[in-house]
Amino acid sequence: MKLPFQIMLYFAGFGLLFGLLSVFGTGRTLETFITDRELKQGSLISQIIVKSISRDTINGDIIPARDTLKSLVDKHDLIHYAFITDFDGRLFAHTFPGQFPAQLAELKDISGGRYLTLAPQGIKILQDSYPLIPGMEARLNVGLNQTGNLSFIKNVKTRIVEISAVVALFGLAIAYVFCRRICRPLEKLTNHIRAYGRGELQEKVTIDKRTLEVSQLANEFNQMIDQRGKAEELSLRLGRIMDQSFNEIFIFDAETYRFIQVNQGALNNLGYSMEEMTHLTAQGIKPKVTPEQFDNMVEPLRTGEKQMIVFETVHKRKDSTMYPVEVRLQLMHDENPPIFVAVIQDITLRKKAEQELENHRNHLEHLVNERTAELKETSEQLLHSEKLAATGKLAASFAHEFNNPLYGVTNVLEEVKDGVTMDTDYQNLVDIGIKESHRMAGLIRNLQDFHRPTSGMLIPFNIHEAIHDMTLLLGKKLSQRNVDLEMNLADDMPKIAAVPDQIKQVVLNILQNAEEATPDRGTITVSTEVRDSTIKLHIRDTGPGISPENIKKVFDPFFTTKSAVKGTGLGLSISYGIIKTHGGNIDIQSAPGEGTTMSITLPIYRNGHEDT
């Protein structure tokens, strides 16, 4: 319905409503006034009655109480009936000529100030009640005849309705004039507002300024258009900034943690729609943070201890994949209700870079440790080579000087043994002297070999030949001690460039050391392998092993843990020199109680080797 018709109806309705309210208000006022007046008059009469019948009621004298009650009621036209209830709330006496009306007996509430129609006469009654004794159940109940009063009130209401009809017609005339002056500008403004609501209006509304209020309303509407346009433009800019941000931006309720707004970057990364996000909470996408932990984290924001907290956690996507994030969280107290604003940065690449950096650092540390170990080993080998060189020079200086005198002593002792008859004791002493002379000569020869470790020509040589020959020499001794000899030799072993006698000497020295270290019923294992451009020989025993402080000295000249009778400490030193001369390496692994493994590495033979 259009506004002019509405206004005319409003005016007409106002007139009618005025009449109805007047009827209702006047009627209620008259009823209240008459009721109060009647109740006051009835109260005065009732007080007289109460004084007259209180004693009879207390004594239980029904007939005197009834007669007194009836005589007093007959004197007053206002009172139509009266009845008394005793201290138990039961009917005691009444003024009705016959039985007590069932209509009154069935009433649950007979308190004062209540209107009712008494059948069958249809008399309008105002019911009132007064206590015989304050605080007791015994009461005097009276019915005040209101038929005349109500008829007067009805006539007054009829007059008011007639006046209201005249007012309504006058209101319609005023409404018509008002609509001509006010409604047309309002209708024009309304049409502009509707068009603006549909997004169709771009221009401002113009209203005749003769109607000041409507003109002001139009101006306010135009200002609203300007402000709303600016707000929409700002909102669009902020929305574009949020959606174009590479970071995830979340806005969620400070109490329920339920998401209110999420930018497009977060939706793309998590894989949810905006509708789905509004059903999730900030805790729901953080599987590694419990609700209690999250409450504890945001507590400094609630108390104002901190303005922002920064922490790292993991977000869970819709497809259950996870990715690391850095969270910057703030609490907006001024919003109603308060909200959290979280700016999230996906730190997958950063974590990957950190992990790669850590791996690179560990790799560099490993390389440094390897290079340090190699440098240490090279330094030790250089030191050992210097020791060997010094020993060789020492051997060269005194081997010749000792050899000739020793040879002469040995010849003299042999001549004495062959040409002189001696007691057995002296004969034994001469034998010991000859034996020790030969041992000393062997020692001098070892020293000379140590000084000149390579005295032959390098030829292609299969190291398995040296292994077979040397194990054959030791076979009987090993079997006597029940020492097992295990052979794990590689197939198709390539040859090496070697001086065979020297390689056999090295193998024999190491096998002898292994045999001497291995207890009875122990095991010696000999194995070979081909690795890259080298061959490797491993000789392992089940002996007591070598302590860490001695393992660095095993290749030093004259170092031995054996007695002087069993060894001179030159065997491994000479072997070391021979292997180095052949371009190889000799290594030892041992620990107390775990046996010892000697490993020899030699280059595979290639054409073009020169004599050494």
Image (cartoon, helix red, strand yellow):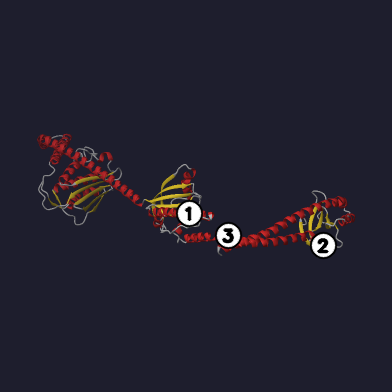
Which quarter of the figure has residue 124?
bottom right
**Camera-side residue: 364 or 287?**
287
- Check disc 1: other Cα within 10 Å, few if <14, some if 14-19, many if 20+: few
Relative to the observer, which residue lies in front, 581 or 289? 289
Are circles 2 and 3 on residues that touch, CB within 8 Å? no
The residue indicated by pointer 2 is 101
The x, y position of residue 468, in whole percent, is 19, 52
* Residue found 69% across the figure and 58% down from its top: 22
Near mark 3 (Cα within 10 A), the count class, few <14, some 14-19 or many ≥20, is: some
Of badges 2 and 3, the one in the foreground is 3
> Is residue 519 at least partly visible in the picture?
no
Identify the residue at image location x=86%, y=58%.
95
Residue 181 shows in this picture: yes
Image: 441 above or below 319 = above
What is the x, y in percent for residue 252? 47, 52
Under tag 3, what secondary structure?
helix
The vertical placement of 23 against 516, above or below, is below
Q: Circles 1 and 2: CB distance less than 8 Å?
A: no
Of callouts 3 and 1, the N-terminal one: 3
Q: CA distance from mark 1 to mark 2?
A: 72 Å
Instruction: Give the Cα separation between the discs numbered 2 and 3.
Output: 60 Å
Q: Quadrant of residue 427?
A: top left
Q: Position of residue 334 (x, y in %)?
A: 49, 47
Residue 459, labelled with which disc? none
Question: Circle 3 is placed at which residue position?
Answer: 178
Residue for badge 1: 224
Indicate whether 270 appears above or below 457: below
- Whole-number angstrom distance, CA of label 3 to CA of label 1: 27 Å
